[in-house]
Amino acid sequence: MTFFLVPALLIIAVSFFVNFQSSATFKKNVVLGITLPREAQDDGRVREILERYKKANLLLFLAALGGGFLVALPSEASLVILLLIIWVVLLLWAGTMILGSYSQKLMNLKTEEGWHMGATNMVRVDLIVSREKAKMPVSKLWFLPPFLVTVGFLVWGFSRDSYMLFGSLALGETLLFYLLWVLSARERARVYSDDTEVNLAITRLSIRGWTLCWVALANLHSYLLLSSALFLRHSETGNFGAIAFLTTLVTLGAIVMTASHIRRSQNQILSGSDSTLVVDEDHYWRGGIYNNPHDRRILVEKRVGYGQTFNVGSKKGKLLYYGTTTAVGLLVLGLLLLFFGLDTAQYALEITDSHVVVRAPLYGFTFRQEDIKSISLLAELPRGTRTNGAETSKYALGNFTMTGFGKSKLYVYKNSSTYIAIQLPNLYVFFNAKTQEETEDYYSALQACIP
């Protein structure tokens, strides 16, 4: 687990660092979540606050790397998840506190100098942009290839369990990216300048950029899932952790690059316009959350970090924000409880008059005694690939494809000197207990079942 956990922790730490560090770059006259006029942006005191914030954020990143090392130490999956949750929460809390502290310093300077600017309770819409923005999104027809991949997986999944798993993943990812495409395509046509051409250019950059991002990621994810499934079909061994790591890295990179390109291009357009309009909305932002009942948009561009966030001032935005937060919390809690159960589970065999029952969480299995072709004791567990199950450095549970054996079900504690291999028609079952004595007792009882 540590081999794949370390890169994941590094991705998380770097993502937090880049996300918080980006708030020190001006984005449409906003920096550290505070709106400033152009004449104030080069003020020496403003630059000093930004430099001090960047140094504090760098120190937090270095501390996060040290904390991530502690997260990777345990071998129990449930303990790793618990420490990971604590680490992420502390990292988010510390980053938010640092940002809030320097944001307040900047706000105090803004108040002291009287840098308040523009209207505070007005959302203007360019009607020409509203009519034209329907032509701006990348065509939704580009979701057809991922949809076809999903259908193929679900159809083939009736004959192969692993394909059904891939199909479920493909369906979930395609729907998620399509939802993001819809929300991005419906971006409201706000006014940034008295010049309609400027408003068109800025809105086109945002809608075109984000819809292209979601379409590209939907296709990329489906093709990677298809490649993984084909690899599994033609190879008995392999590890898909590298593919998952690469997919996560590319996804985050695509989002950051899209946001950076949109931000940089929009800033260039606004800096060259002499009729820029600025609305001071600082009082609608608290802790990175946008709450503006006068704005009907559901999604708005983040002031801190990359991407978009919900407007909790709208009913739909509030529902989506709290619904998503609750769903993520329940999912994390469910995973924690699930892996705690897996880490503490005891595998057992129950032999009845005609059947053998494998007692194990989630992946229990029953087979007939008359189907047993052979039983053997192995000193080492063969190498293999997990297709549907759970695996840590201490145990392997679920469906695997094992080298030299093929399709298999595993109920084993690793680092043991004894494993039972039970041959069934078109399937092997690998089993052992926590002690060698218990495993040998099970082996003797199973031998008595062979006709």
Image (tube, rainbow, N blue to C red):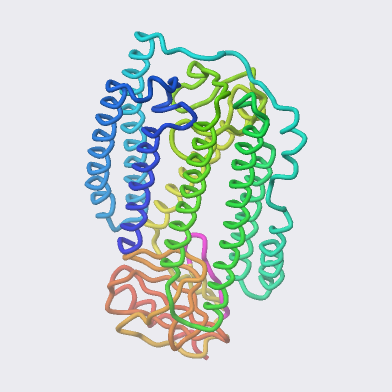
Which quadrant, please, contains the N terminus? bottom left
At horizontal 37% and vertical 52% (from top left) the residue drawn is 11
**405, 244: nearer the viewer:** 244
**363, 299: nearer the viewer:** 299
Q: Quadrant of residue 326?
A: top right
Q: Is residue 133 above or below residue 314?
A: below
**169, 54: nearer the viewer:** 54
Q: Is residue 320 above or below residue 435?
A: above
Residue 176's spot in the image, x, y percent? 62, 49
**65 lies left or right of 244:** left
Q: Is residue 174 above or below residue 290?
A: below
Q: Quadrant of residue 123?
A: top right
**279 lies left or right of 70:** right
At horizontal 50% and vertical 44% (from top left) the residue drawn is 259
Q: Is residue 370 visible?
A: no
How many numbered circles are shown? Answer: 0
At horizontal 60% and vertical 22% (from top left) the residue drawn is 313
Q: Is residue 413 above or below residue 134?
A: below
Residue 131's spot in the image, x, y percent? 77, 35
Q: Is residue 402 visible?
A: yes
Q: Is residue 363 magenta?
A: yes
Q: Is residue 364 magenta?
A: yes
**357 lies left or right of 418:** right
Residue 381's spot in the image, x, y percent? 35, 80
Residue 361's spot in the image, x, y percent? 48, 60
Numbered range of the magenta stretch? 359-368
